[in-house]
Image (cartoon, grey):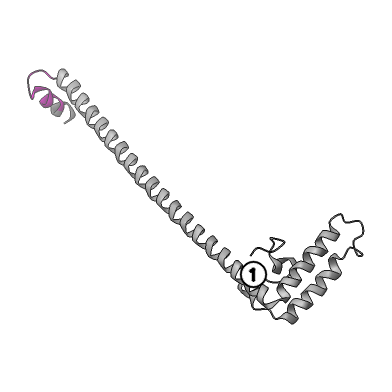
Amino acid sequence: MEDKFDDDHYVILGLPYGEEGAKLSEKEITKAYRKRALEIHPDKRPDHRNAYADIQRLNASYAILKDEKARKDTKLRIRRQSSQQGSKRRKTVNDLEEIEKASEAKAREEEEEEEERIHRKFKEEVTRIRAKQGNRVGPIGIGLEKEKVMRG
C-alpha cells in the first residue's frame, strides 16, 4: 500500500536514510520530529508559501515512522527500491562494459587495418623505387657495379 505522500519519510524528518535510518528508535524519531517541527512550523515562517504543506508532510511522515508496522512497510519499500536500483545499476554497468569491449575490438581492428594499409603502401613504394632504379640501370648488374665503383 502506498502512503499519502510518496516521499522518503526519513529524509523529511532529517534522519539518516536507508539501513542506518531503519535502525532508529521511536525516541530518536520523536526527537528529530520535534526539532524539525520547530524549524519549519508555519508560525516560524509566516511568509513562506509552502509552510503549511511542509508541516503536513512532516506530520504524515512522523505518523508513519512512529507506527512500528508502517515503519516496517517503509523499510521494506526502501529495501525494494534499493534492490531495484542496484539491479538497474548492475545492468547499466554490464551494458556499458559490453559497449566498451565492442568499441575496443573495433578500434583494434581499425588499427590493424591501418597498419596493414601502411605496410602495403610501403611495399608499393619500395617496388616503385626499385622499378625506377631498374629503369636507370642498363644491362643487369652493370648499374650496380657502377654505383659500387663510384661510391668506393
**Quadrant of the frame with the C terminus:** top left
Q: For this rendering, which residue is in front, 104 or 121?
A: 104
Is 29 left or right of 125, judged from the image as shown?
right
Q: For this rendering, which residue is in front, 5 or 25?
A: 5
Q: Amino acid at mark 1?
A: Thr
> Residue 14 lies in magenta, yes or no?
no
Is 88 left or right of 150, judged from the image as shown?
right
Q: For this rendering, which residue is in front, 23 or 115?
A: 23
Q: For this rendering, which residue is in front, 77 or 16?
A: 77
Q: Is residue 120 above or below residue 1?
A: above
Secondary structure of the residue carrying numbered label 1: helix
Count residues near mark 1 (Cα–Cα under 10 Å), then give few for <14, some for 14-19, many for 20+: many
* Residue at 32% in and 36% down: 114
Q: Is residue 16 above or below residue 25?
A: above
* Residue at 71% in and 67% down: 9
Q: Position of residue 111 (x, y in %)?
A: 34, 41
> Residue 146 lies in magenta, yes or no?
yes
**Quadrant of the frame with the N terminus:** bottom right
Q: Quadrant of residue 143?
A: top left
Q: Position of residue 72 (x, y in %)?
A: 63, 74
Q: Is residue 140 above or below residue 109?
A: above
Span of residues in magenta: 137-147
Q: Residue furthest left?
A: 140
Q: Position of residue 145 (x, y in %)?
A: 10, 26
Question: Circle 1 sits on which residue?
Answer: 74
Q: Quadrant of residue 51?
A: bottom right
Q: Quadrant of residue 43?
A: bottom right
